[in-house]
């Protein structure tokens, strides 16, 4: 592999860094257009209330305020509601009732940012408070306060979803030698990318063309949604351009359509002026979609010898006031049925019920493929509960039960076909690297002295790369992805892809895929994405799907180019194409290395000296429909020490062994794992959004919502095994989210392990010092 | 001293004239009294390298140096910078040569989405002014007011250490 090409497997330094380290990135709030207006939003202080009156007169008197928009103004345009991605609908602005605190109530458009904020302050709303329901379990009881009066169905139940063999699973539990059961609450959390959400919408009244710069992870899908929702206002898809510029982190929070986007677009269409809306952090954290909020009851049936047999899981999912989750259409609970994890359960049954509450919409991702963290956390916690019950070492119990490497492709009890894996190898490597046996000895010695130390394991299996069109769509649009490659006459390359980086480094890694396939140095390859006027249609970047799907498209498009290039090379070499082979990044006559042509020579010929009868040019497009999902996996081991005085959990070491198949850029993969681990640490120990009985958010700013800083975050240790995906063109599986999926269980298991000898079997995350201290006091071991 | 230039603007806001030196260039400008330093930089001067990530002085994306001290420019009024000097990310590169901190972030993969990066680098510059050879813990403490959601901080710590090493070597070379 020639290093100067910078192909697959090289830690090529990132191209995108050049602008970011100079402060020259272009994020949405950096877009400034002549005559641009600013939009700001008035929000509800109450979680459930009837709007008796909205007085906008004082706001309208402020010099510089151009317009105030209320729900009533949107009714004639039929824009007061919008569809969600989950066949529900969501208010853009309310006409009579607000359903959660911080819900959008009115919008002010002004000539300056501060004046728009002044306008928001001057709006007076008369509310009549209504009863509030914040607990999804209470919300599903008969007679509960009704959240959604607009629905025909007069209760708070959204949907019931189930998968698996119920009768067979029930029988397995009836016959089981050992059954363990654990209730878990996986709390509501918020992705809180450091850049909040925003948009600049610019409607050209003469051309009828709408251009938007928007913090979106899926620009093409947004373009189609705008055309479908606002087609009646004269917006047609060929005259809508969505640009997703540099994005300051996404993690799933920039997949949904928020009312602010719609309001800015509407305001620009009505005024003919560009309109900017940038939410502040409080708005972002209080009103934008949330993740998790799963109330889970899980049971595992096993033999006395530890053989796992059956899994039964019942869950209530809190979706807030609107089901605005961003799952593939067929999967209201996402891919939660990856919950059988790394183990060959014979029987499984999973059911989930969605509930409405007076809270902002929930159910988006938090740096994980649809509901996969909920699944991985549950199974990995449950395996430790079983280990405790059977008095077995948790590593040994996992090793005994893993799906063996010889069983792949493996079809799980809930219907997934796992592509490849070697779970035992990953766990063994993690155990060797951390010195597992020694740590267990140290733990025993410390326990004898009354010190609290724990070791936690998580051997997770992920499911990413949505997905095959037979099962995966969003709003009916199949979840393929795309790449278009043009090789210019001088051998330089333009690559355009249907996905969109939010920090993942696509400009570098997708260049490396093409470099590897075409033998052209990565420095000569430009990668563009995020502009719907130029990029081929794609479904965007989330659920770790860029490499598995658009990465496949990129490799295949490059191979299409190589096919044609081979014919041109044969023409230049005056050889039969069958006698020409691609070797050492060149075309050469078989057995005659001296007779060769580089891709650059071929590219020039494609425009200057191509064979008679062949089309000129050297370019290709591929829309890649993956034959299956990919199943990255890993084994994480965490060592914690607990302060018996404060209850503080200190992570002493954390070893993460990941297997994401073929690695394109080891440096970038390691960076993604570091970040993912930190977003796994966050909900395990720190982050949670809670509400009081009146539906007031607790933790609605960074003062209270605790993102880990450099002080809480340990020095992550990483290692890898490589088990390529057999069905992916380059064998890659995707990695952006693995660590967020796998880490919480390792940390929670370590804390429980430190306290297990005191009779502790489970602690709900986040495991805060006060929760631990309370347990220490109850057990009489607090200092 | 900031001088009140007019009792109120047409929008009813007090305006003051300030003199501030930004990345070595003097600016004499009228600003509304309530304008935050970060908005003054971004909106009035078009210097969009300094970012806004929260409203509560927690995230540090807006960190700049005011009179040599790292401050969060979302919680400082522009008029407080009157007669002072401000350094931002745009001033790090000099004569086409990257500052060692910029080089460090690139070499050690200390950034992903790039949004926290300018503030993170300015905090690091302030640290390295005071402490030529910070330990890992000192680096972590120094950046504990700057949040990053992408990197998990491991490579940011390495980036700052890289810059410290380069700056020490450069200083020794000169001495």
Image (spheres, coloured by chain):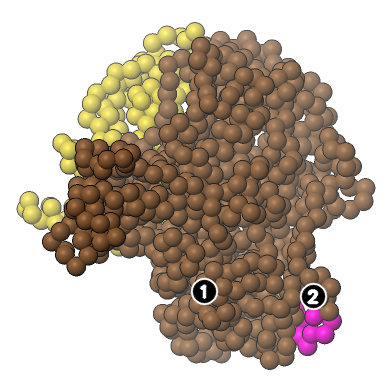
Judge left or right: residue B110 versus residue A264: left
**Which of the two labelled residues, at mark 2 and mark 1, occupies the earlier sequence position?**
2
**The disc label shown at residue A421, or none:** 1
| Chain in brown (letter) | A
Front-lying residue, A747 or A556: A556
Q: Position of residue B54 (x, y in %)?
A: 50, 40
Locate residue A748: give its quadrant: bottom right
Judge left or right: residue A323 versus residue A486: right
Badge 1 crowding class, 10 Å Cα cut-off, few under 14, some 14 to 19, many 20 or more, is: many
Same chain check for tags 2 and 1: yes
Could you tell me how far apart the alpha carbons at marks 2 and 1 are, in whole angstroms?
26 Å
Q: Position of residue A348 (x, y in %)?
A: 74, 72
Which structural element holds mark 2?
Answer: helix
Above or below for A319 versus A416: above
Residues shaded magenta:
A172-182
| Chain in yellow (letter) | B
Q: Position of residue A322 (x, y in %)?
A: 73, 41
Residue at coordinates 39% horizontally, 44% vertically from top-left? A620
**The disc label shown at residue A133, or none:** none
Residue for badge 2: A169
Front-lying residue, A485 or A768: A485
Residue at coordinates 51% horizontally, 58% vertically from top-left? A737
What's the chain of the residue with tag 2?
Answer: A
């Amino acid at each position: 592999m020639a290093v100067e090409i910078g192909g697959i497997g090289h830690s090529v330094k990132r191209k995108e860094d050049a602008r970011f380290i100079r402060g020259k990135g272009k994020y949405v709030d950096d877009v400034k257009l002549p005559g641009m207006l600013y939009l700001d939003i008035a929000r509800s202080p109450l979680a459930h209330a009837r709007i008796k009156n909205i007085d906008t007169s004082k706001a309208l008197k402020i010099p510089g305020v151009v317009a105030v928009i209320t729900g009533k103004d949107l009714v004639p345009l039929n824009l007061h509601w919008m569809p969600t991605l989950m066949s529900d609908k969501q208010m853009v602005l309310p006409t009579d009732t607000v359903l959660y605190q911080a819900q959008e109530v009115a919008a002010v458009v002004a000539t300056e940012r501060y004046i728009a904020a002044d306008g928001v302050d001057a709006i007076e709303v008369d509310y009549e408070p209504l009863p509030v329901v914040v607990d999804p379990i209470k919300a599903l009881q008969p007679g509960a306060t009704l959240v959604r009066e607009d629905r025909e169905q007069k209760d708070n139940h959204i949907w019931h979803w189930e998968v698996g063999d119920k009768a067979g699973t029930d029988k397995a539990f009836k016959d089981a030698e050992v059954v363990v059961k654990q209730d878990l609450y996986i709390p509501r959390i918020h992705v809180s990318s450091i850049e909040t959400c925003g948009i600049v919408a610019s409607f050209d009244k003469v051309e009828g063309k709408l251009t938007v710069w928007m913090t979106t992870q899926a620009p093409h899908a947004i373009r189609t949604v705008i055309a479908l929702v606002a087609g009646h206002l004269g917006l047609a898809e060929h005259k809508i351009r969505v640009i997703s510029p540099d994005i300051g982190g996404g993690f799933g929070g920039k997949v949904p359509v928020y009312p602010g986007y719609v309001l800015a677009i509407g305001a620009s269409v009505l005024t003919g002026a560009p309109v900017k809306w940038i939410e502040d952090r409080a708005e972002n954290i209080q009103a934008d979609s949330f993740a998790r909020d799963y109330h889970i009851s899980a049971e595992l049936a096993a033999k006395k010898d530890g053989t796992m047999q059956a899994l039964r899981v019942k869950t209530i999912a809190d979706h807030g006031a609107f089901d605005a989750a961003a799952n593939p259409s067929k999967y209201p609970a996402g891919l939660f049925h990856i919950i059988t994890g790394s183990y060959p359960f014979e029987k499984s049954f999973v059911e989930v019920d969605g509930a409405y509450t007076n809270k902002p919409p929930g159910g988006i991702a938090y740096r994980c493929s649809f509901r996969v963290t909920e699944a991985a956390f549950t199974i990995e916690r449950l395996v430790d509960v079983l280990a405790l019950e059977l008095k077995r070492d948790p590593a040994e119990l996992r090793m005994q039960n893993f799906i063996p490497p010889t069983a792949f492709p493996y079809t799980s009890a809930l219907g997934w076909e796992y592509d490849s894996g070697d779970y035992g190898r990953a766990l063994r490597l993690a155990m060797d690297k951390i010195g597992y046996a020694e740590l267990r000895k140290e733990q025993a010695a410390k326990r004898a002295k009354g010190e609290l130390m724990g070791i936690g394991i998580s051997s997770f299996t992920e499911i990413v790369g949505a997905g095959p069109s037979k099962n995966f769509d969003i709003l009916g649009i199949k979840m393929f992805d795309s790449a278009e490659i043009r090789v210019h006459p001088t051998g330089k390359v333009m690559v355009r892809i249907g996905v969109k980086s939010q920090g993942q480094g696509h400009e570098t890694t997708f260049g490396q895929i093409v470099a590897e396939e075409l033998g052209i140095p990565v420095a000569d390859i430009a990668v563009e994405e995020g502009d719907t006027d130029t990029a081929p249609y794609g479904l965007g970047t989330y659920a770790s799907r860029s490499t598995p799907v658009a990465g496949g498209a990129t490799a295949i498009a490059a191979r299409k180019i190589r096919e044609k290039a081979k014919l041109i090379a044969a023409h230049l070499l005056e050889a039969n194409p069958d006698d020409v082979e691609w070797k050492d990044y060149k075309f050469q006559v078989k057995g005659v290395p001296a007779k060769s042509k580089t891709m650059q020579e071929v590219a020039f010929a494609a425009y200057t000296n191509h064979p008679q009868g062949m089309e000129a040019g050297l370019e290709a497009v591929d829309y890649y429909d993956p034959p299956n999902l990919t199943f990255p996996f890993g084994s994480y081991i965490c060592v914690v020490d607990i302060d018996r005085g404060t209850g503080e959990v200190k992570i002493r070491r954390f070893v993460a062994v990941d297997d994401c198949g073929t690695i394109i850029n080891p440096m970038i993969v390691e960076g993604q794992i570091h970040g993912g681990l930190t977003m796994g640490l966050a909900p395990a120990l720190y982050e949670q959004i809670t509400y009081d009985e009146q539906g007031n958010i607790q933790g609605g700013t960074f003062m209270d919502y605790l993102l880990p800083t450099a002080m809480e975050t340990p020095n992550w240790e990483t290692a890898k095994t490589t088990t390529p995906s057999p069905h992916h063109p380059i064998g890659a599986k995707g990695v952006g989210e693995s660590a967020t999926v796998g880490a919480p269980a390792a940390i929670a298991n370590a804390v429980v392990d430190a306290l297990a000898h005191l009779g502790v079997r489970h602690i709900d995350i986040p495991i805060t010092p006060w929760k631990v201290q309370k347990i220490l006091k109850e057990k009489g071991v607090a200092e | 001293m900031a001088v009140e230039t007019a009792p109120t603007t047409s929008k009813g806001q007090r305006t003051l004239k300030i003199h501030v030196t930004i990345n070595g260039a003097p600016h004499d400008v009228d600003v509304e009294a309530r304008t935050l330093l970060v908005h003054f930089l971004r909106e009035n001067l078009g210097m969009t390298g300094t970012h806004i990530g929260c409203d509560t002085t927690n995230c540090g994306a807006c960190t700049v140096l005011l009179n040599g001290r790292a401050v969060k420019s979302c919680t400082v009024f522009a008029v407080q910078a009157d007669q002072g000097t401000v350094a931002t990310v745009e001033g790090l590169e000099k004569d086409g040569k990257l500052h060692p901190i910029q080089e460090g972030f690139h070499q050690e993969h200390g950034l992903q989405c790039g949004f926290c990066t300018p503030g993170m680098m300015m905090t690091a510059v302030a640290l390295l002014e005071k402490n030529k050879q910070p330990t890992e813990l000192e680096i972590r403490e120094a950046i504990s007011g700057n949040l990053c959601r992408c990197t998990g901080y491991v490579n940011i710590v390495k980036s700052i250490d890289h810059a410290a090493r380069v700056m020490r070597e450069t200083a020794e070379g000169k001495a």
